[in-house]
Amino acid sequence: GLSLEHYFVILSHERRTYNFALAGIISALRWLSSHVMTGFRDEYRVDGRLVGYSQFIVKGSTLRAMWFYQMTEMARSQIWFHALRTNVLRGIVMENIRYVDAGPSGSKKISALKEKFGFKTVKEWRTKCSYTGPFLAKMPPRLKFIGEEKSWLNTFQFKPCVSSCSCREKPLM
């Protein structure tokens, strides 16, 4: 499950948008939502300290990135890009996955950034992506990125898949 450490990551993330009191309340609600939600988490740590995490689900033929939070001081670290790339690669290598849904966008800037990577914002995302079918209950396979051991991302001690509205269709092979 989630810990107080996860709450402080969410709080730091939300403080960029809201005043302290409102960010505290919103963070508590987001922490609770993330805690009770089915799915898997990827965690990013620096020197053992949690600095960011993303959460995703697999339902039907869609992998959906649900949440992404990172500490304010890590905002320019490109962890978000790693999380997006990781979920797209998971969608490619997993059987029966036809769609990768990059999840909701908190702003027009995020929507525009996702569109640069081929994730068109659609209002009718439930009809575009197929969520018909069961949730994935077992952990997806671990991904091995070529060259990752030499990458600056090693600084983050990426821990994939701890248990616990944009769409892009994967080309059928």
Image: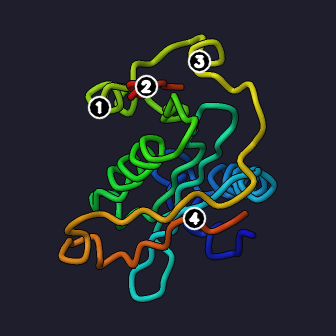
- Residue highlighted by disc 4: 161
The tag earlier along the polypeptide, 2 or 4, is: 4
Question: In this orientation, which residue lies closer to the viewer: 110 or 140?
Answer: 140
Alpha carbons under labels 2 and 3: distance apart? 10 Å
Asked where in the image residue 145 lies, by quadrant, the reply is bottom left
Asked which secondary structure carries label 2, the reply is strand
Q: Between label 1 and label 2, give the one nearer the viewer.
A: 2
Question: In this orientation, which residue lies closer to the viewer: 163 or 122?
Answer: 163
Q: Hey, what amino acid is under mark 1?
A: Phe
Instruction: Check residue 125 in the rendering and tell me which mark sits there, or answer none.
Output: 3
Quarter holding the N terminus is: bottom right
The tag earlier along the polypeptide, 1 or 2, is: 1
- How far across and how far down the image is residue 156, in percent? 36, 75
CB of mark 4 within 8 Å of CB of mark 3? no
Color encoding of the figure: rainbow
- Residue highlighted by disc 1: 117
Regarding residue 11, the answer to whether it shows in the image is: no
Q: Residue furthest front?
A: 173
